[in-house]
């Protein structure tokens, strides 16, 4: 049963081939048996999962139906879950049990999903490799010596290893799409504001967005359907009707205009990845798409702009973790200043401290105009580039990452090298656009992803293109050895 997709699980439950409780128990046993190899979970919620599965079975027995009713999933460990540890993979929140459910969690619970556990991640979602977690690095199921990507590496590794069919994740600069690419999954970052951020522990509030990680575009459509929608509790949530994402999956690609930015294919891109991107373009052309070269001239400024804006917002958001109200508190502080300094110094890891310091510096008197204000101006230019491009094309296609998954520890002493792995993904966050990564092949046994970007609120278009591509390719069906 562990090889079933969400769509196949929905059909199996509807046809009474198995119950949600049977499926849940089988996957929990698999997690306990196999997850020690990859470390993709921080908490496994056996009791909650079984009780939710029984409730889902009872709802089906009473005549209720639904694509997600009884479907097992996992939540990235920054979504608050009532009564269950929500740690953000940090020592700072190791003892924190959320008193409420995040909107994403409650919406999916209402749809009938079963929570198998909370997945590992980079601490406070800061990282591109899932190595900064207080609970240890996550290993890539395709090769245990390599990273699965971050910060949603736990969700990605768990789905890739067939420990569960799908999981929630978040994307601040590529943290859904990059791990999807490095583990051969489909991952979708929706338009900013499409999915509520309420109850999602913040890293960078103007960039963070929740979305689904699954094996197929069809499954991402099902999960996004349950997650999306306006939320009055989130001031950044947008009151926009949510379409039926599954309804347009099989729409024709005849005449679809695909833009290939020339800036994507310069120095820094592994030529083997470039070849697979071109191969995916040819498959889409066979399906009727038309391809043209475009330009995103301000893309070169995206990384420096992002690494001013995101740390600035992080320094503000993380100031609440001070050892006073909740979370980690140092022992025997001599005064309030000592309490602040030692609680934060002992509770936060190195990468989180680095970004807080960069952000505080960028926002400080005398530097705000030189750094933060300039970064926001660049952000507007990047958005304008996309708006101009979408006058000529329907979607933009390119590599998700410039390189293959690197070995664990290879970039620990060079954070900038790790930041550069986000070069193709962060522009979508800066502009607030939807983006999707889909499996496109393998190099040396490691997965490669292709990224698609679309105008605001056109998630259905991205899912349609990815689904049609997956109907004529089999990259998304392959599983790592041993899983």
Image (tube, helix red, strand yellow):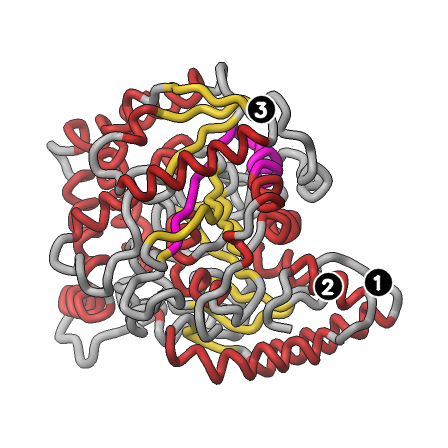
Q: Residue 105, percent across and down?
A: 58, 60
The quarter holding residue 205 reads: top left
Magenta stretch encompasses residue 71:
no
Q: Which of the two marks, 2 or 3, is nearer to us in this view?
A: 3
Q: How far apart are labels 3 and 1 at the CA level?
A: 38 Å
Disc 2 from disc 1: Cα separation:
9 Å
Can see residue 92?
no
SS label for mark 3: loop
Left or right, residue 431 beside residue 14: left
Q: Of helix, strand and loop, which one carries label 2?
A: loop
Q: Residue at x 16, y 65 (%)?
A: 341
Q: Position of residue 358 (x, y in %)?
A: 17, 46
Which residue is at a point 73% across and 61% down the rendered structure image?
10
Q: Nearer the viewer, mark 3 or mark 1?
A: 3
The structure residue drawn at horizontal position 49% and vertical position 25%, both measured from the top left corner, is 258
Q: Which segment did they paint magenta?
A: 447-465
Residue located beneath label 3 in the image: 256
Residues 143 and 105: in front is 143
Q: Residue furthest right?
A: 63
The residues bearing labels 2 and 3 have C-alpha atoms spaced at a distance of 34 Å
The answer to whether 472 appears left or right of 291 in the picture is right
Residue 272: x percent and y percent? Answer: 31, 43
User: Does the magenta run of residues contain 455?
Assistant: yes
| Disc with the residue nearer the chain's start (2 vs 1) | 1
Q: Secondary structure at mark 1?
A: loop
Instruction: Give the number of the disc on residue 69.
Output: 2
- In the rendered view, would you say 279 is above or below 90? above
Residue 151 x %, y %: 35, 56
Query: At 28% across and 39% down in the image, what residue appears?
Result: 423
């Amino acid at each position: 049963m562990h090889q079933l997709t969400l769509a196949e699980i929905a059909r199996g439950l509807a046809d009474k081939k198995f119950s949600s409780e049977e499926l849940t128990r089988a996957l929990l046993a698999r997690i306990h048996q196999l997850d020690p190899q990859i470390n993709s979970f921080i908490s496994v919620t056996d009791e909650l999962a079984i009780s939710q599965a029984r409730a889902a079975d009872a709802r089906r027995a009473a005549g209720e139906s639904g694509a997600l009713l009884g479907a097992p999933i996992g939540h990235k460990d920054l979504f608050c879950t009532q009564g269950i540890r929500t740690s953000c993979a940090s020592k700072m929140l190791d003892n924190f049990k959320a008193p409420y459910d995040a909107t994403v969690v409650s919406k999916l619970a209402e749809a009938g999903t079963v929570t198998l556990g909370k997945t590992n991640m980079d601490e406070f979602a800061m990282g591109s490799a899932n190595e900064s977690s207080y609970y240890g690095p996550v290993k890539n199921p395709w090769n245990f010596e390599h990273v699965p990507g971050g910060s949603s590496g736990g969700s990605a590794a768990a789905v890739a290893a067939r420990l569960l069919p799908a999981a929630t994740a978040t994307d601040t600069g590529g943290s859904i799409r990059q791990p999807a690419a490095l583990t051969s999954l489909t991952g979708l970052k929706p338009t900013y504001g499409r999915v509520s951020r309420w109850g999602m522990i913040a890293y960078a509030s103007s960039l963070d967005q929740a979305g689904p990680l699954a094996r197929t575009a069809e499954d991402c459509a099902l999960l996004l359907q349950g997650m999306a929608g306006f939320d009055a509790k989130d001031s950044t949530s947008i009151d926009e009707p949510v379409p039926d994402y599954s309804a347009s999956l099989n729409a024709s690609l005849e005449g679809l205009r695909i833009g290939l930015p020339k800036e994507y294919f310069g120095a820094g891109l592994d030529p083997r990845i470039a070849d697979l991107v071109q191969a995916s373009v040819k498959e889409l052309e066979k399906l009727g798409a038309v391809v043209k070269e475009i330009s995103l001239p301000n893309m070169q400024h995206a990384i420096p702009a992002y690494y001013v804006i995101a740390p600035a917002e992080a320094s503000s958001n993380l100031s609440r973790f001070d050892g006073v109200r909740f979370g980690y508190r140092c022992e025997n502080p001599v005064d309030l200043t000592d309490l602040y300094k030692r609680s934060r110094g002992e509770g936060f890891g190195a990468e989180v401290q680095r970004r807080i310091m960069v952000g505080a510096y960028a926002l400080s008197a005398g530097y705000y105009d030189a750094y933060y204000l300039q970064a926001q101006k660049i952000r507007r230019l990047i958005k304008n580039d996309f708006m101009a491009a979408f006058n000529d094309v329907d979607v933009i296609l390119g590599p998700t990452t410039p390189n293959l998954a690197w070995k664990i520890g290879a970039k620990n002493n060079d954070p900038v090298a790790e930041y550069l792995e986000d070069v193709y993904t962060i522009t979508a966050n800066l502009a607030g656009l939807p983006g999707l990564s889909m499996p496109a092949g393998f190099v040396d046994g490691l997965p490669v992803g292709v990224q698609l970007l679309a105008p605001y609120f056109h998630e259905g278009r991205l899912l349609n293109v990815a689904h049609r591509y997956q109907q004529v390719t089999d990259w998304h069906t392959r599983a790592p050895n041993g899983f």
